[in-house]
Image (tube, rainbow, N blue to C red):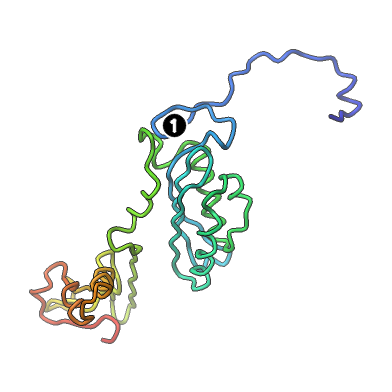
Amino acid sequence: MEYSHEIEVMCPVAKGANHGPAPIPQEGKWTKVKECSEISGLTHGVGWCAPQQGGAKLTLNVKDGIIEEALIETIGCSGMTHSAAMCVEILPGKTILEALNTDLVCDAINTAMRELFLQLAYGRSQTAFSEGGLPVGAGLEDLGGTLRSQIGTMYGTKAKGARYLELAQGYVTRLALDENNEIIGYEFVNLGKVMNDVKKGGDANEAIKKATSSYGRFDEAAKYIDPREE
C-alpha cells in the first residue's frame, strides 16, 4: 500500500466502534451482508433507455449471489425484443455483480439490472420476508398458464374518444357502447388459449371462438364497434 507523505507523518489513532453492516431482510432472515455471495431473493424492476422509446421489466431469482432464473419482458421497441433474447442467455449463472457490470445488449435492460441490484443490496426484494424465498421457476407464475406477458394497449383522441386495444384478459375485438356512445364493456380473445388449442390440433376458427369472452355490460350495448377500424 502506498501512502502520501502527509499520512506517513501522522500518528496512529485506534479505531473504536466496529459494528459491521446493518442487517437486511432476505428470504425470512436478517443478514449482515458483506459479500455478493450472501445475497438471495426474487425481485422485479423496470428499466428504460436514454431516448425512452421502450421499457423492459426484469425479474431475477437470486440464490447465494448467483442468478438462477431470469424473466425479461419488453414493450415499445422492436430491437429490445431481440436484445432480451440475447440477455436471457447471458444472465443465468452470473453473480449479481457480474450482471451489473455486463453489457446486457440494451440500455433499458441495463437500467433494470441496476435497479434490481439496488433492491437486492438494500434488502428490498419481493421475497424479503418469505422464508426460504421462492423456488426457481417462480418467475413463470407472472405469465400465467398461457405463458404470455400481460399487455395493456389503449389509444384515445379528443376528436374520437378512447379505444381499448388489448388488456390483461386478451386482444380486444369489439367495444360495447351505450346510447350515449360511452364504453360499457368489451369483447376479447385470449390469444394464449388460442395457441394452446391450435398446438393440440384444434381448428383455429373454433379455437378463437372458445377463447372469446366479454367483460362489463357487453350484452346491453346499443352499438358495437371494432376499435381498430371504426
**Which residue is pictured at 42% across the width and 44% down the height?**
42
* Between 57 and 145, the one nearer to me in the picture: 145
**Which residue is pictured at 49% across the width and 42% down the height?**
119
**Which residue is pictured at 47% across the width and 47% down the height?**
68
Q: Could you say which quadrant of the image residue 157 lies in? A: bottom left
Identity of the residue furthest to the left in this view: 220
Q: Is residue 17 above or below residue 90?
A: above
* Between 50 and 146, the one nearer to me in the picture: 146
Quadrant where the N terminus sits is: top right
Answer left or right for 105 relative to 167: right
The answer to whether residue 153 of the structure is visible from this angle is yes
Circle 1 residue? 25
Quadrant where the C terminus sits is: bottom left
Residue 90, given in percent of the width and then of the height, sits at 56, 57
Residue 100, given in percent of the width and then of the height, sits at 59, 49
Q: Is residue 114 above or below residue 26?
A: below
Q: Identify which amino acid the numbered label 1 is placed on.
A: Pro
Residue 216, given in percent of the width and then of the height, sits at 14, 67
Q: Could you say which quadrant of the image residue 50 lies in? A: bottom right
Q: Is residue 33 above or below residue 16?
A: below
Answer left or right for 1 relative to 75: right
The answer to whether residue 184 of the structure is visible from this angle is no
